[in-house]
Amino acid sequence: MTKKECNEIIKWAEQLTDEELEKEYYEAAFESLGTLTDEMYERGYDEADIREREELEQSYRDKADILEMLCLNREIKLWE
């Protein structure tokens, strides 16, 4: 993720209410759990498709990390 993309997520997330931020965090976290790429390798998917999926999964992980940091800064308790 580029610094610009990171800053865009932060700017967007700072406009959210605590409840919205928490919801967005959970959505990003759940999207980043597990991976479809292992199955894609086993089924013989094209390498370009697998790389694209890996990049998408990484972007969800990065977004979840950023949103988690913002939640902690706002003292939003997660996973309770």
Image: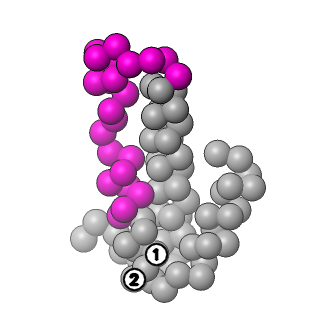
The answer to whether any part of residue 75 appears in the image is: no
> In front: 6, or 77?
6
The answer to whether any part of residue 77 appears in the image is: yes
Residues shaded magenta? 26-48
| Badge 1 element | helix
As drawn, the label of residue 21 is 1
Q: Dot 2: few (<14), some (14–19), or many (≥20) neighbours within 10 Å?
A: few
As drawn, the label of residue 19 is 2
| Badge 2 element | helix
Q: Quadrant of the N terminus?
A: top right
Name which quarter of the figure residue 73 lies in: bottom right
* Residue 57 rendering spot, x and y as whole percentages: 45, 41
Q: Quadrant of the C terminus?
A: bottom left
Question: Which amino acid does the dot numbered 1 rest on?
Answer: Leu
Instruction: Give the spatial CA distance, label 2 vs label 1.
Output: 5 Å
What residue is drawn where x is 34% and y is 69%? Answer: 78
What residue is drawn where x is 45% and y is 18%? Answer: 46
State left or right for residue 64 relative to residue 42: right
- Which residue appears farthest toward the bottom when viewing the image? 17
* Residue 4 rendering spot, x and y as whole percentages: 75, 55
Question: Does 60 appear above or below 24?
Answer: above
Question: Which amino acid does the dot numbered 2 rest on?
Answer: Glu
Question: Does 74 appear above or below 78?
Answer: below
Question: Does 8 appear above or below 13?
Answer: above
- Which residue appears farthest toward the left when viewing the image? 80
What residue is drawn where x is 53% and y is 36%? Answer: 55
Name which quarter of the figure residue 6 lies in: bottom right
Question: Does 59 appear above or below 73?
Answer: above
Q: Are marks 2 and 1 in contact (CB under 8 Å)?
A: yes
> In front: 39, or 67?
39
* Residue 59 rendering spot, x and y as whole percentages: 53, 46
